Amino acid sequence: MVGSLAIVIRNYGGVWSRDLGTLPWLAGKEALFGIRIDGLSSLMLLVITIGGFLIVLYSGRYVSSRNREHPSDEGQGRYYFFMLLFIAAMIGLVVSPNFFQLFIFWELTTLCSWGLIAFYRDEDALRSAYKALLITHAMGLFLEAAIIIVYVNTGSFAFAAINQLSPGLKTLTVVFFVIASLAKAAQFPFFTWLPTAMAAPTPASAYLHAAAMVKAGVYLIARILVSVLIFPPKIALLLGGLAIVTMLTSVFLYFFQDDLKRLLAYSTIANLGYMFLGLSLGALGSNLGLRGGLLHLIGHSFTKSLLFLAVGAISFTTGTRKISSLSGLGKKMPLTSLAFVLGALAISGVPPFNMFWSKFFIVSGAFQLHSSWGWTLGILALAESVAGFAWFIHVVHKVIFGAVAPAVEGAQDPPASMAIPLLALMGLILLSTVFALPLIDRLAGGLGR
Amino acid sequence: MTLTELFAGAMAVLVATSILTLLTADRRTIAGGINFAGTACASAAMLWIAAKAFFSPVEFTFGNVRVLGLVAQLHFHIDALSAFFVSMISILVTASALYSVGYLDHYKHDGLRRYFFPFPIFVAGMLAVVTVSDWFWFLVFWEVMTLASYFLVIFENDKKENLSAGFIYFFMTHLTSAGLMVAVMFLSGRTGSFSFTALPQLMNSPPSAFAGLLYRFRH
C-alpha cells in the first residue's frame, strides 16, 4: 500500500511506464509485459491498495474461531493465498500497458473470486462460486475475442490500437468489450451472480465489491473510453440505457431482502450502474458526467467497504445477518452502528459524504447534454437514489434503533484490529472526494472533453 | 468588527459549541450550559445583523469558493425578509436551548450527545439557509439543516412512533431536496450561474430542453 501510494503521489496523474519483457512465441510491436501508471491507474491503485490493506487487517480476527457466524480457524492459509493474489491480480490489471497483460490478470481475478466465494465449501458456497465463474469466464470470452480482433488486424495489443481498426470492426470490438465488462461488473442482464456470491467470507465480499472484480469491469470501459478517440455514440447510449435498467431493477429488489449482505450486493449492482451511466455520459461529451462516474468509483469503494465491514462486525458478534432478527444494535455496538449509519447516509447520496458529490456530478452531467435523453437519464437516476435512500433509512431504523433484540443481547463492538479499518473508512467516506478529484480532473481534462 | 466578521464569528461559535458539547455531554448540566451560551451568543450577533438589515439590506461575500471543481459564490444578502426569519430563528432557538437544560433531565438513561451535537449545527444550517443568496450553497445548507434536524427528530429512538415520524420526515425532505437539486442543476445549466439573481434571467429565456421533454411526455 505504501509503495503504491508513493508512486501515485510522485506521479500525480502523469504517465510513468516501464517495459518488463515479452514472449518469444508471440511477436508484437511492443513489450507484452510492463507497468504503465497514468491518472486512471493511479485512481484504481488508491482503492485497490488502501482497501486491500484495511480488509486484510480486518480479516485477522474475522477469519477465526472467535467469529460466531463461522467459528473456525481452518483454511486461513487458503483464504490469505486467494485474498493476496486477488490484490496482486488487480494491481497487475490496472497497471497493464496493453490488452494482453490486462486479459491475463482479468482471468486471474475471476479465479481468485471463485476461490474466495467457495471458501466455506458448503453446497451453497460451491454452487455460488461455480455460477460466478461460469458467467464471468464465459462473458470473458468476448474480451478475448475483442483482443484477438485488435491483434490480428493491427499486430499490436496496445490500447490505442483500436483506433487503427475500420469503423465497423471498431464498433464490433467495443461491443465485445462492453459485454465482458457488463458481466464482470454484474450489470443487467448478467447481474445474478453477484447476490449469490455473498456466500464468501464478508471481508472477501467487501473487497470483491469495493476494489476488485466488479470494478475491473468499470475500469475496462474507462480504459477504452480514454484510449478510443471517438467512442461510438450508439454504444454510449445503449450503455447509459442498460445502466438505468440495472439501477431500477436492483433498487426494486432491495425491498425483498432480509440478508444485510444481499441488500449490499444489490446496492453494489445499482451503484455500478451509476458508474456506467457516468462513463456513457462522458462518451456522449459530458465532462462532468465522466468526472462523476470516476468519482463514484472511488466513493463507492470506500463506502461499500465500510458497510460490508460493519455488517461483518455485526455477524461476527451476533452470528446473524438477518434484518428481521436484528434490532437495537446502537445500544450494544455504538462504533459499528455509527459506521453503518454513516455508510448508509453516504451510499444514499446525503451531503457532505463522498457519494453526494459524485451523484450530483453524474445527474448534472446528464442534464448538461441538453437533450430529452439526458433529462430522462438524470431524473431516473435521481428516482433510484431516492428509493434506495428510503430503504437504507428503513433498514437503519430497523437494525440500529429500537428495542434490543434477543440476538443482539450479548453483542459488542469488534476488537481493535477490526475497529481500526472501520474508523479509517469513516474518515475516507468524507475525504476521498478531496484527494481523488484532482487526479480525476487531470485525467478528464486530458481527454479534452 | 465588520458585519462579515460578526456573521462568520456566529457560525464559528455554533460549530465550536457543537464540538464542545460532544466532549462534555456526560456532564449533562455543563453541556446544556455550553449549548445555551453558544446558541445565545450566536443569536445575539445574528439579531444585531438583522436589526441593521431591517433599515437597509446587508450584503457580504466570501468570494468565489471552489468546492470540488464547482465554483459557487458564497454570497449572503440579508434584506427585511431574511432579517425577519433571522430574528425569529434567533429568539426561538435561544429559548429552546435554555429550556433544554432543564427539560433533558428526565432522559436519565439516554446519552445527550445525540441531542447536543446536532442542535447548534441545525441552528447554523437554518440561519445560513435564510441568508445565503447562491442556489448551490442554499442546497448545501438546506441539506445540513435537514440532516441535523433528522437526528433531533429521532432522539428518542426507542419509540417506534418516533422512528416512523423520523423516517417520514427524512424521506419527504430528501425527496423534496432531490427536486430542489434538479432545479439548481437546471438553473446553472441554463444560466451558467448559481446566483439567486440568475433566476429572473431564466424566467425570460426561450423554452428549454426540459420544457421540450415535458411537452413530449404530455403528448
Image (tube, helix red, strand yellow):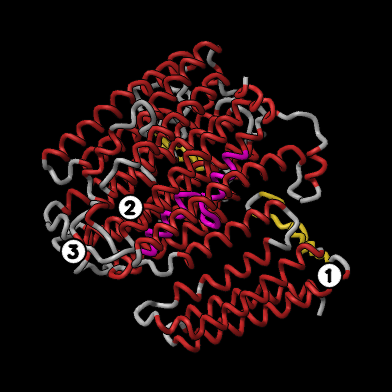
Rounded to the nearest angstrom, the CA distance separating label 3 from label 1 is: 59 Å
Residue found at the very far front of the displayed protein: B161
List the residue tagged with mark 3. Answer: A406
Whether residue A4 is situated above or below residue B205 in the rendered picture: below
Numbered disc 2: what chain? A
Query: Which type of secondary structure does the marked residue at label 1 adopt?
Result: helix
* Amino acid identity at mark 2: Phe
The residue located at (58%, 39%) in the rendering is A363
**Is residue B104 a member of the stretch shown in magenta?**
no
Numbered disc 1: what chain? B
Q: Label for residue B54?
A: 1
Label 1 Cα neighbours within 10 Å, binned few <14 / some 14-19 / many ≥20: some
Task: Answer whether labels 2 and 1 touch (C-beta < 8 Å).
Answer: no
Task: Answer whether labels 3 and 1 touch (C-beta < 8 Å).
Answer: no
Query: Which type of secondary structure does the marked residue at label 3 adopt?
Result: helix
Rounded to the nearest angstrom, the CA distance separating label 2 from label 1 is: 53 Å
Query: Which type of secondary structure does the marked residue at label 2 adopt?
Result: helix
Nearest to N terminus: mark 2 or mark 3:
2
Looking at the rendering, the stretch of residues picked out in magenta corresponds to A337-364
**Is residue A363 a member of the stretch shown in magenta?**
yes
Q: From the viewer's side, name the closer residue of A64 and A234.
A: A234
List the residue tagged with mark 2. Answer: A308
Task: Answer whether labels 2 and 3 touch (C-beta < 8 Å).
Answer: no
Label 2 Cα neighbours within 10 Å, binned few <14 / some 14-19 / many ≥20: many
Residue B211 in view:
yes
Q: Quadrant of residue B1 in the image?
A: bottom right
* Amino acid identity at mark 1: Phe
